[in-house]
Image: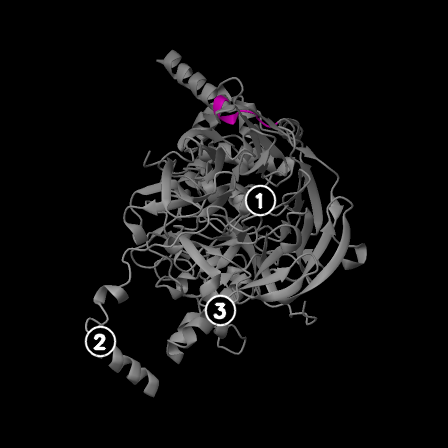
């Protein structure tokens, strides 16, 4: 303290030694930038904001950073229980959202695909789509993208069912394709998608290069939509989309070709373990190595399919062998993943609506994210 | 239009009157158990089509009341009512679906029911369900065109 | 990972409510907190059984319907497959919408067992729309609920369709009839 006084006194004695205002003035108007390419392990945490639906948001998060301020990288708004798709090729984010001219009470409805860039998290463009997109609890297959990321497909429910096609390169709406009796979009091949029908069959819609409809076909009934329906989520491994069912089967559907090919269903559980069932908002995820993770509930029964579970079961998706049972630190409601190689992570939104991070494949608990989000029910990886 | 959308009771009354007028007391063609048919309609159809089949005012869900049986007057219409996804995909047996369809025709549009109407039977429904419509929108548009042509012929 | 197995608890929404109760606990009065939790706290069987309010709702099929329970509680028998805010905590009742909202004409319809008479009733879960989410008495039960591709059996959908506003406010549970004995 004495030293400081002395120094200050000396400075004041020197002519012109006063601290000039512009030496301490900080620059105005600085806005942070993120890298144009995110580290693979970063996550986009989608808070659907169930209690304030018009105020949803997608947070960009570094899940390995130690504190809340260092975890929180930025945010995109996501209005009215929106959907999110990650654009890896162009380094963009796509938020499929709904606005109403009178906000909280409605008015004219406008549905848009809002395009953000990675680095600036600024709106780069907006494509108006038919004001028909499905709204409700978030489902990973409510939207889908062609493998070349040129076409974005958005499931509509009015209750008439259809799919809107958006060209992400030209940032324009291309077409609306009816999918009567069938819901959702699961991309298959390069220019097709299938929807899941209420009778347990699949309806495939083919598109041309530009995204215009080019025919459709129906499969046979593949599962019992009343007694043992598939969840609205799949894990993708080696071109096979694995859909868990309420009772614990897995329906594998090969999506390499323009028409999906269903394989033989397999069980997650041994006969003695049938009370264990997959459950949760998103009960299945595959990591970047193709390993499958299923959120499992010990006392599964009619009506418990959304309640989540206490363990994550790890499966080799080729051999259908269970590799491990990970006992979660906290009861889990939904799964997400990010990262590659030795840096693979599992995100589990827990029963207190916090996001727990585990290292894969062994499942060591890392920590619980410090970020504040009311209902972070979908987590997307940057990988 | 307004009268068609009036109360459920009105529809029932109209049907009741017709049933009494016909030779078979209180029976609807091909409906063994009207209460059961109504419950199956409620659980599988009413959510979107509404209690009277009136659908939505904006046409997103078509108005079936006072119109449904007209499909039976054009080629392909009888098949369409089974093959349309709401029917074909309903999680009920072919017997139950046949009964619901017959019940809907009698309660929602008795006035257009053909005089020689042969009720749907389970076998027919089962066979048709095995071949769901590939292109519902085009098929329906073609049927509506045929129905419009039929109106012109009658004028 | 931790070796403790968390116990199986209630549904997703119990958890939502629990989380909310924690987050609001520090800035709301005790009374306010109980208001938030509503039925979730009041669900125990010790409470007196209240008659269902039948304010502006559609006429019930029978005045003699055995219909006891607390319609502001998520445990109430009619809510066996409801998903959202209970209108009975939002200015409406179990079968009517809050003032100034609009009832959705399309919805999904399921069945619930009435413990009073042991019969299954057909329940229409019409949403009330046109004002932002009520936020009170969040309740999610899923008996008979099926995925969204089975729309006639799915409570995950926002059913504010065919209304002038798509904005969801709360959910009702309207009895439309008696289910078949075998259903």
Is residue A130 among what the camera can see?
Answer: yes
Residue A7, position in %: x, y?
30, 80
Residue reaching furthest to the top: B153
Q: Is A61 on the left-hand or right-hand side of A336? A: left
Residues at marks 1 and 3, CA–CA distance in whole angstroms: 44 Å
Question: Which one is in front in this view, the residue at disc 2 or the one at disc 1?
Answer: 2
Q: Which residue is mark 1?
A: B36
Q: How is the image coloured?
A: one colour
Magenta stretch bounds: B132-138
Residue A281 sits above or below residue B57 on the image:
below
Residues at marks 2 and 3, CA–CA distance in whole angstroms: 61 Å
Question: At 61% across and 41% down in the image, what residue appears?
Answer: B91
* Secondary-structure class at tag 2: loop
Q: Which residue is mark 2?
A: A14
In which image quadrant can residue C89 be found?
bottom left
Which mark is on residue A220?
none
- Count neighbours of disc 3 (C-alpha within 10 A) and say few if under 14, some if 14 to 19, many if 20 or more: some
Residue C23 sits above or below residue A274 on the image:
below
Question: At 76% across and 54% down in the image, what residue appears?
Answer: A322
* Secondary-structure class at tag 3: helix
Q: What is the quadrant of the N terminus of chain B in the image?
A: top left
Q: What is the quadrant of the C terminus of chain B in the image?
A: top left
In which image quadrant can residue B44 be found?
top right
Q: Which residue is mark 3?
A: C19
């Amino acid at each position: 303290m004495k030293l400081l006084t002395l120094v200050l006194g000396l400075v004041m004695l020197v002519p012109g030694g006063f601290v000039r205002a512009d030496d301490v003035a900080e620059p105005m108007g600085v806005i942070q930038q993120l890298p144009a390419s995110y580290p693979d392990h970063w996550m986009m945490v989608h808070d659907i904001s169930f209690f304030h639906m018009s105020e949803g948001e997608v947070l960009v998060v570094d899940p390995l950073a130690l504190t809340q301020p260092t975890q929180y990288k930025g945010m995109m708004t996501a209005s009215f229980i929106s959907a999110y798709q990650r654009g890896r090729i162009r380094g963009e984010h796509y938020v499929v959202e709904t606005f109403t001219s009178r906000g909280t009470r409605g008015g004219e409805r406008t549905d848009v695909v809002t395009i953000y860039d990675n680095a600036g998290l600024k709106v780069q463009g907006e494509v108006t789509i038919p004001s028909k997109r499905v709204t409700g609890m978030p489902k990973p297959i409510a939207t889908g993208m062609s493998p070349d990321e040129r076409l974005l497909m958005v499931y509509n429910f009015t209750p008439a069912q259809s799919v809107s096609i958006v060209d992400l390169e030209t940032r324009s709406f291309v077409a609306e394709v009816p999918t009567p009796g069938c819901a959702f979009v699961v991309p298959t091949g390069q220019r097709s998608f299938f929807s899941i029908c209420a009778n347990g069959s699949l309806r495939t819609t083919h598109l041309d290069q530009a995204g215009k409809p080019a025919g459709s076909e129906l499969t046979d009934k593949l599962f019992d939509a009343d007694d043992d329906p598939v969840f609205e989520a799949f894990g993708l491994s080696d071109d096979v989309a694995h859909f868990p069912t309420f009772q614990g089967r897995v329906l594998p559907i090969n999506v390499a070709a323009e028409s999906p090919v269903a394989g033989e269903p397999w069980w997650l559980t041994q006969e003695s373990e049938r009370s264990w069932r997959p459950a949760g908002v998103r009960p299945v995820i595959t990591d970047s190595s193709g390993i499958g993770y299923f959120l499992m509930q010990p006392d599964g029964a009619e009506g418990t399919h959304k309640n989540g579970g206490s363990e994550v079961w790890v499966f080799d998706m080729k051999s259908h062998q269970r590799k491990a049972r990970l006992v979660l630190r906290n009861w889990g409601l939904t799964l997400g993943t990010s990262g590659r190689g030795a840096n693979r992570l599992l995100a589990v939104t827990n029963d207190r609506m916090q996001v727990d991070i585990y290292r894969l494949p062994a499942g060591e608990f890392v920590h619980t994210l410090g970020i504040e989000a009311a209902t972070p029910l979908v987590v997307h990886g940057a990988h | 239009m307004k009268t068609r959308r009036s109360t459920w009771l009105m529809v029932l009354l109209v049907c009741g009157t017709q049933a009494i007028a016909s030779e078979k007391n209180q029976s609807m063609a091909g409906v063994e158990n009207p209460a059961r048919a109504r419950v199956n309609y409620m659980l599988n159809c009413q959510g979107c089509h509404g209690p009277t089949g009136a659908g939505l005012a904006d046409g997103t869900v078509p108005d079936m009341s006072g119109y449904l049986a007209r499909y039976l007057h054009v080629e392909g219409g009888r098949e369409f009512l089974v093959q349309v996804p709401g029917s074909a995909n309903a999680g009920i047996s072919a017997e139950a679906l046949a009964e619901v369809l017959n019940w809907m025709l009698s309660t929602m549009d008795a006035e257009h029911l053909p005089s020689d109407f042969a009720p749907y039977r389970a076998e027919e429904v089962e066979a048709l369900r095995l071949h769901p419509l590939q292109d519902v929108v085009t098929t329906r548009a073609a049927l509506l065109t045929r129905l419009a042509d039929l109106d012109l012929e009658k004028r | 990972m931790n070796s403790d197995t968390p116990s199986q608890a209630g549904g997703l929404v119990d958890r939502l409510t629990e989380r909310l109760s924690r987050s609001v606990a520090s800035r709301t009065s005790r009374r306010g907190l109980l208001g938030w939790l509503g039925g979730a706290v009041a669900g125990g069987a010790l409470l007196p059984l209240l008659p269902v309010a039948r304010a502006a709702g559609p006429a019930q099929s029978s005045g003699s319907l055995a219909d006891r329970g607390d319609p502001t509680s998520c445990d109430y028998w009619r809510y066996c497959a409801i998903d959202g805010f209970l209108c009975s905590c939002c200015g409406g009742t179990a079968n009517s919408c809050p003032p100034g909202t609009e009832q959705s004409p399309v919805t999904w319809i399921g069945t619930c067992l009435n413990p009073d008479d042991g019969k299954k009733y057909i329940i229409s879960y019409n949403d009330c729309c046109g004002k932002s989410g009520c936020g009170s008495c969040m309740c999610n039960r899923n008996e008979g609920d099926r995925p969204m591709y089975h729309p006639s059996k799915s409570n995950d959908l926002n059913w504010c369709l065919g209304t002038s506003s798509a904005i969801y406010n709360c959910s009702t549970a309207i009895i439309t009839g008696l289910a078949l004995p075998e259903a």
